[in-house]
Amino acid sequence: MINKKFLIKKNTEFKKMSDQIKITCSGCSLLCDDIIIIKHEKDIEKILGTCLKGKEKFNQIISKNRILNPLIRKNNSLEKINWDIALDKAVQMINNSIKPVLYGLSNISCEAQLNAIKIARKINGFIDSNSTICQGQVLNFASKIGITTMTLTDIINKSDVIILWGVNVVESIPRLLSKILFSRGKFRITGREIKSLIIVDIYKTASFNVLGTRDLALIIKPDNDIELIRFLKKYCREEYKIPAGGNSGIDKQDLERLISILLNSEHISILTGQALIKPQGEGHPMKELLELIKILNKYKKIGRVSLMMVGGHYNMVGFEHIALAETGKNQSIQFRNGKSVQTEETIISKLQNQDFDLSIIVGTDPISHFPAAISKNLSSKPMILIDNKKSGTYLIADLILPTAITGIECEGLAFRLDHVPIKLKKIIDPPNNILSDAKLLENILMKLE
Amino acid sequence: MELFQYLPQTNCKKCGKLTCMAFSLELLKGNVNIEECTPLLDESKYQNKYSKLKELLKGEEGQKRELKIGIDIVKCDGCGICVTICPVNARYCYSILSGKVADYPPDKHQLFMVKEGKCELLSIENCRRLVTEGKERECRVCETYCPRVAIKIEYI
Amino acid sequence: MEMILNTIRLIDYDQNKEWIHNDIESMEDNLAIGFINPMDFKEMYLVPSLKLRISNKYGDIIIKFKQGKDIPRGIILMPISMWSNQLSYVENKNIIYKNIKVQVEGTRDSPTKLIELINRIKKK
């Protein structure tokens, strides 16, 4: 009797609550978990708190470029087919191939990533995610040198200095600065007044507009990051004079200020982007930066220096964790006889050497992201695309399987850019017969068995 | 600054202020009268400047100027920096302190809110420029830190 | 003129956003765009009605352009898209998206269409 009463009470409460719900936005890797949605019956009425990028994610639901049916390419045009035929066709294509490649996986939930890895294991394929050409490379260096990381909460509460090195967060992750720089933390209660910002970039980006009087703007010559990092390393290791002409386009005064900030402040967070991933000359700036952080951390008695990679896709970090737990390797995994084997190859070398006969692309757009030469190789072999909207890859793929949007039409787990797992909620029902990524991949896996 | 241009700029100290710049600032606030600057009245070469100054000051007294915070909807990308940095917002909504979205429906004191990916001005009744005194009245943080340069504080 | 191409992310010219709203036929309106310094603009004797032909040994494209005074001399900026990726390349298993050497010249041709780029990729 008591149980029943309790249930009824809970139900009515839920109905009241359903007008306003807090959700996590899956628009970018920041995964803002404080977005408020006002629901009217089954539709979303208002979205509060998202940036423009997050709003675009919600616009996808009714976008005219949404894919709503499984499609197959026949004589250069796409034809609608039903789900059973589509799945059979997919399984047939997979069974016909000897060296399949799975790529993408950074715009799907962790559950779906797990299923994708299971499929790769089943079909003895090669699986790789977008992080190979992005932040995954940092972790490769970190496995040799070591890395200090901080969570967003740590940065909010403790950081004194935030360095944006070659990343324009105002354009790529709009809400990041309002969260980490302008918020007032537990121990740094005054917020903007105590946190200082250093931006290193090759031109005056939109991020430079938030600089105050205490902050430092460093405009560097292109491809000279490695010079600057090497100079800082040298300076920290031994007594070394700052050259009168400055270094890599930065004058002496600014260098002095940079060094005094680096050595005298407590908690420093360095945020980097795609700019430091490219090798410069013979060395690699990322490797040098990790070494610089190590040296600075040895020097510091209080506080520490940490690094955070800013990626775009919302669950790029998730694949690293899932793959590491499942196979012992964080990226570029080759399966043979159901086991992962040692390989030096990445998705790039695979595509460059045309060492594949089928590609399964999940939730990404490699045709637009890759250089034309590689896209050409990719399009020369059969391709299955699993995605929810049209893209450059859509115009080339042979079989297209639509899915629901994770975080809006289905739930799932995702990892934020600072390696914190966050649950994504389901808000509305997906359109007719469309499954989530996880469910679709599971169905394919079952059919394969 | 405009007022300063029409003063003698000799720093004669006859008005009791140290410099002409200080006098112009006081003039702007309405603490002093323009007649206190005696050289302007006495010397004929300043006659032009005097009449222009009179005109400028009349314009301000004649109609009371109203504060307006303009947000350029096209430029705005909903980053929420104005919501987080506004001191009034932070005082009345706890969640804003840690950079989060404020509760809905908004507090009656709240100035800014991000809605559908764009920033919206709820009310300016509680803006620091209207309700506080002294240095706090000069608050311009939302305009200064907007990365898109979309916010403009003006008096119309 | 020889210039350095840098691909960047811009919220107004985001390819994800374009793929949500726009038609495939008119995709080049917003994505085939570059930004250069006004001094470079003068040096190349350009007029606003012209387009830019950018080429290197990996490919060539025609884009519209805008001037930005914050952009350093000798650098052309492009949002990441299929257009900019016609010029990027692979070096030692790394994709080079930044600081690509390109040849830039003014042209009267219209910007490259998306369908044309897709056809280039499709040709075997």
Image (cartoon, grey):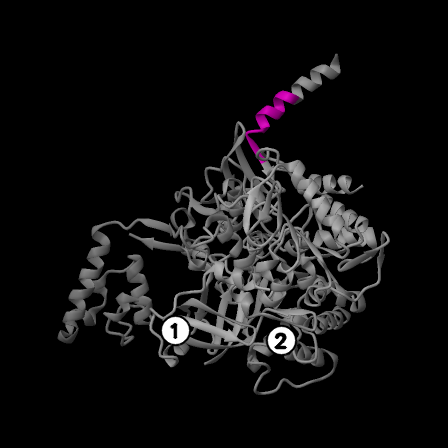
Chain under numbered label 1: C
Residue shown at the point (58%, 29%) measured from the top left: A18
Q: Which quadrant holds the N terminus of chain B?
A: bottom left
| Element marked by disc 1 | strand
Question: How far from the left and from the top, in percent, is residue B53?
Answer: 20, 64
As drawn, is A446 to the left or to the right of B125? right
* Circle 1 crowding by C-alpha within 10 Å: few under 14, some 14–19, many from 20: some
Q: Is residue A16 magenta?
A: yes
Q: CA distance from mark 1 to mark 2?
A: 34 Å
Instruction: Decide whether residue C38 is among the magenta residues.
Output: no
Q: Quadrant of residue A417?
A: bottom right
Position of residue A35 measured from the top left corner of the image (x, y, whole percent): 57, 42
The residue positioned 59% from the left and 59% from the top of the image is A367
Q: Amino acid at mark 2?
A: Asp
Q: Which residues are magenta?
A: A11-21
Residue linked to disc 2: A225
Residue A226 position, x and y percent, is 65, 77
